[in-house]
Image: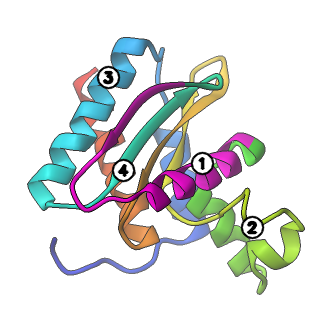
Amino acid sequence: MTQPASTPTVEELEEQERRLVFRRFTHEDAWALGSLLVETARERQAPVAIDIHRAGQQLFHAALPGSAPDNDAWIARKRRVVERYGAASYLVGARHRAKGTTFEESSRLDPDTYAAHGGSFPITVEGAGVIGAVTVSGLPQLEDHRMVVEALERFLARL
């Protein structure tokens, strides 16, 4: 990867969510998006696990070389943040940091169940809202987040 960019602001993260919206999201879309993420991770030799859920159902899962069962636990914890707050897991954590606190301190939620760390992004459909999440785990949290955002940008540009 190239030189890392600066940490995004809350406003920049919110803009990503406003921009990365689907007209529809099917099983085939989950397969195509998941496959794009796998391709990207393989090109970068990223030791990640990838997961796509819609309405409580797992539509896609892949574990690349170097990933571990712990990545699946992180995926579940980050995805639960998206499901509860309707926002990217990294954005939820950033909002707390912007207020001078942490998600763990102020949410009062079990940290073994919820993790506001980067890597899970809402699947938002026009007219329906958040219907699921696409999640990557295995890299530092900002890199997980950026990998998902990049894949969503590439995928939506094809539609």
**Callout in the foreground (3, 1):** 1
The residue tagged 2 is 111
Residue 88 seen in this snapshot: no
Judging depth in this view, the residue of 51 and 121 nearest the camera is 51
Q: Residue furthest front?
A: 69
Q: How crowded is mark 1: few (under 14 residues within 10 Å), some or many (20 or more)?
A: some
Which of the 4 image quarters holds residue 14?
bottom right
Between marks 4 and 2, how big is the CA–CA gap? 20 Å
Q: Is mark 4 on a helix, strand or loop?
A: strand
Amino acid carrying label 1: it is Ala
Amino acid carrying label 2: it is Pro
Q: Earlier in the sequence, mark 4 or mark 2?
A: 4
The residue tagged 4 is 49
Q: Residue furthest left?
A: 43
Which of the 4 image quarters holds residue 96?
bottom right
Circles 1 and 2 in contact, beta carbons < 8 Å: no
Q: Residue at x 70, y 79 (%)?
A: 98
Circles 2 and 3 in contact, beta carbons < 8 Å: no
The quadrant of the picture occupied by the C terminus is top left
The residue tagged 1 is 76
**Callout in the foreground (2, 3):** 2
Count of labels in the image: 4
Which residues, given as a range, are shown in magenta? 58-83
Circles 4 and 2 in contact, beta carbons < 8 Å: no
Q: Which of marks 3 and 1 is nearer the N terminus?
A: 3
The residue tagged 3 is 31
Amino acid carrying label 4: it is Ala
Up the image or down, 127 lies above or below 8; here it is above
Q: Earlier in the sequence, mark 2 or mark 3?
A: 3
